[in-house]
Image (cartoon, helix red, strand yellow):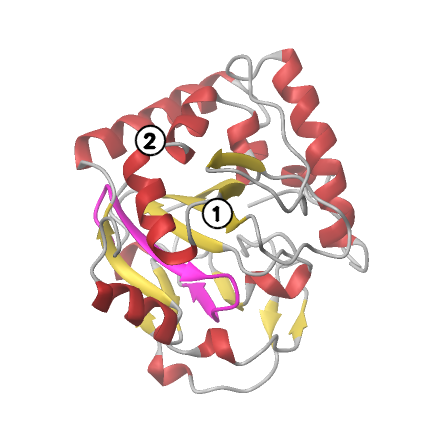
Amino acid sequence: MPKVLTEAQVRSYHDNGFLSPVRAMSAERARGYRERFEKLEARVSDIKKMKTKSHLLCPWVLEIAEDTDILDIFEDLIGPNLRVWSMAWRVKKADGETFAGWHQDSSYGAALPVVLGALALSDCGATNGCLRGIPGSHKWGILKHEESDDPRSILARGQYITDSFDESTAVDFALKPGEIAMFDNSLVHGSGTNFGPDRRFLLLVEMLPTWAKPPRVRQSAMLVRGTDTIGNFDDEPRPNGEWSEQALANWAGVVSRRSKLIFEDSKIGPSEAYGGTRRAT
């Protein structure tokens, strides 16, 4: 028996590869986390580090990952033993340019499965460049991708699918602050441009079950619920303060290993969000 979702919602997720929207927290609390990000953004020069593994940099981001209500949603979909794969901020300018091409997160060496919860911390409707997904595409296997250094792409490698598929079936994951869209990391998804009037604040809460198949290069993921008797992933250090010297060092060590996995065959190399020098959108 699911804890917070209905049995019909759980079936819909597994059939379609996504479930949206689900209320995860109040709109007021969601906006409060956005304000904390903006305060941090105002005082640090390398805010792009928040694009991956941000729970290692800020205790308040880890607070979201360990939120009981959010973990209950994940547990209903993939079981009680959970590790957080990443907490990835996707802040999209209201410039009518920044976008994410059609892609599958599983295409670049991720664990399988990873469930992503796209948590809205601002309005994330169609005009704001909301996420979109192709129902059932998580069952297609991994499609062919190419990479790009297009500065408008919000993705790590500017990746996009080159195999053909029917885009007309796409569904918008329109969200209000505090709502979350759940989707499988093999789902074909992307997002359009943000025509404003405000920046789009989306936090990808990425979780995997402890039984998930690990990537070819051993990775770490923090245990946030239950126990791990399998040992496919290394543990991660908890942050001892926001943007502290130790937290930054821990982040650099973990992300360096992940960067080797994601960019090992890349022509463009890692961006500043993964410890490199290439500009991150």
The reply to whether the C-beta atoms of the residues labelled 1 and 2 are less than 8 Å apart is no
Left or right: 270, with 171 as reference point: right
Hey, what amino acid is under mark 2?
Arg
How crowded is the residue under tag 1: few (<14 C-alpha within 10 Å), some, or many (20+)?
many
Q: Is residue 230 above or below residue 43?
A: below
Residue 113 % position (x, y): 54, 60
Residue 159 % position (x, y): 62, 64
Q: Nearer the viewer, mark 1 or mark 2?
A: 1
Determine the secondary structure under disc 2: helix
At a point 47% along the width and 69% down the height, the residue shown is: 187
3D distance between C-alphas at marks 1 and 2:
18 Å
Which residue matches tag 2? Answer: 34
- Decide which of 151, 238 is in the foreground and name it: 238
Quadrant that contains the N terminus: bottom left
| Residue 206 numbered mark, or none | 1
Determine the secondary structure under disc 1: strand
Residue 86 % position (x, y): 54, 42
Hey, what amino acid is under mark 1?
Glu
- Residue 211, located in which quarter of the rendered image? bottom right
- Decide which of 99, 66 is in the foreground and name it: 66
Q: How many marks?
A: 2
Question: Is residue 187 inside the magenta stretch?
Answer: yes
At a point 59% along the width and 69% down the height, the residue shown is: 160
At a point 43% along the width and 28% down the height, the residue shown is: 61
